[in-house]
Image (tube, rainbow, N blue to C red):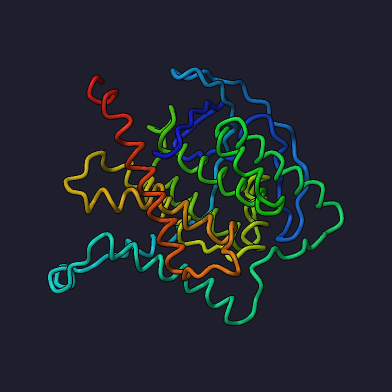
């Protein structure tokens, strides 16, 4: 996986999902527009075999399971035999959709610049705190990446932090010490929670930061759902028989990050590159990073 997390909770059951990183102020949402500061949750740190001291709290979600990923929709035997589609073609269809969304904004003369904050009394400071927490997580666990974000404008920097934290929490579901307790149902509920935050109903402070980000930038939900699909693959298989299968997995767990990031980082107005080519470049970078991540661990995996 592109990121390795390891957290421990005070209590755990098979239906729980991580909601907070570290010592945080948990937010409870009374409706779609307002959130209030909840109790401070104290959780004790756990040192992993790699020597990282990390903290998290957990809570259960009761949302119904959601639909599966767009590019993993079931195909009948006859359809597959008549028109076999490679993983690259399937992923390309998602890339085209993401590029089309941004192109449509441009054609409709909608700006890709950050939309102004809609200030609700009593919430602005809490939202700022949520972004600050995301920045702290990024600074602690992705130091060089964090330094790169400091070159961005404050609005874009905060948005990238929010995306990073969501990806990290998602990866932790299947790549941490409690991964054996995570079920497909838990991932379904995590996806339902994702849909809620995209609709402006975040569950906690980290969701609040991402919900605000997707409201300001032309970020689509599909890459996020596809990353969750990658976590489902981690639950059911660990080996891939050919590069076509591996390519799809690399897209799910890393290429998606590129598609999430382009709308926030933006495309220079004077750029001669097409929107599609920019998205393809971001996708290729994510997949290359994941392949490098896999190769880096070959020696350790062979010894285990």
Judging depth in this view, the residue of 194 and 115 nearest the camera is 115
Q: Is residue 298 above or below residue 215?
A: above
Q: Where is residue 177 in the image (x, y as percent from the top left)?
A: 43, 27
Q: How many marks?
A: 0
Q: Seen from this angle, which residue lies furthest bottom? A: 108
- Residue shown at 65%/61% (left/top)? 200
Q: Seen from this angle, which residue lies furthest right? A: 121
Judging depth in this view, the residue of 80 and 94 nearest the camera is 94
Quadrant location of the N terminus in the rendered image: top left
Task: Describe residue 80's horizontal placement relative to residue 233 as left or right.
Answer: left
Judging depth in this view, the residue of 103 and 277 nearest the camera is 277
- Residue shown at 45%/40% (left/top)? 171
Task: Describe residue 304's horizontal placement relative to residue 118 as left or right.
Answer: left
Q: Is residue 170 above or below residue 244?
A: above
Quadrant location of the C terminus in the rendered image: top left
- Residue shown at 51%/72% (left/top)? 101
Q: Where is residue 303 in the image (x, y as percent from the top left)?
A: 24, 19
Task: Describe residue 295's horizontal placement relative to residue 273 as left or right.
Answer: left
Q: Is residue 12 above or below residue 101?
A: above
Task: Describe residue 235's horizontal placement relative to residue 198 as left or right.
Answer: left
Judging depth in this view, the residue of 197 and 17 nearest the camera is 197
Q: Position of residue 12 (x, y in %)?
A: 50, 30
Q: Quadrant of residue 76?
A: bottom left
Q: Position of residue 133 (x, y in %)?
A: 69, 38
- Residue shown at 54%/38% (left/top)? 18
Q: In which quarter of the image is residue 31?
A: bottom right
């Amino acid at each position: 996986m592109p990121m390795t997390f390891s957290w421990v909770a005070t209590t755990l059951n098979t239906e729980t999902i991580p909601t907070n990183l570290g010592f945080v102020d948990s937010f409870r949402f009374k409706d779609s527009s307002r959130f209030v500061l909840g109790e401070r949750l104290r959780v004790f740190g756990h040192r992993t075999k790699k020597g990282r001291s990390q903290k998290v709290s957990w809570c259960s979600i009761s949302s119904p399971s959601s639909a599966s990923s767009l590019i993993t929709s079931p195909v009948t035997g006859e359809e597959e035999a008549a028109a076999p589609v490679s993983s690259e073609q399937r992923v390309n269809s998602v890339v085209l959709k993401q590029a089309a969304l941004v192109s449509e904004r441009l054609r409709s003369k909608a700006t890709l610049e950050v939309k102004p904050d809609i200030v609700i009394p009593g919430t602005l400071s809490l939202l700022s705190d949520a972004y600050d927490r995301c920045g702290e997580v990024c600074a602690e666990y992705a130091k060089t990446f964090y330094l790169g974000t400091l070159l961005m404008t404050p609005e874009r920097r905060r948005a990238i932090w929010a995306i990073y934290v969501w990806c990290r929490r998602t990866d932790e579901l299947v790549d941490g010490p409690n991964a054996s307790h995570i079920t497909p149902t838990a991932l379904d509920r995590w996806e339902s929670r994702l849909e809620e935050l995209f609709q402006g109903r975040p569950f906690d402070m980290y969701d609040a930061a991402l919900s605000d980000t997707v409201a300001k930038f032309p970020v689509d939900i599909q890459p996020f759902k596809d990353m969750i699909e990658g976590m489902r693959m981690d639950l059911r298989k660990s080996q891939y028989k050919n590069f076509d299968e591996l390519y799809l997995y690399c897209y799910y767990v890393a290429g998606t990050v590129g598609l999430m990031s382009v709308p926030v980082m933006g495309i220079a107005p004077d750029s001669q590159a097409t929107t599609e080519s920019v998205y393809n470049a971001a996708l290729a970078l994510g997949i290359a990073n994941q392949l490098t991540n896999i190769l880096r661990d070959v020696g350790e995996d062979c010894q285990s």
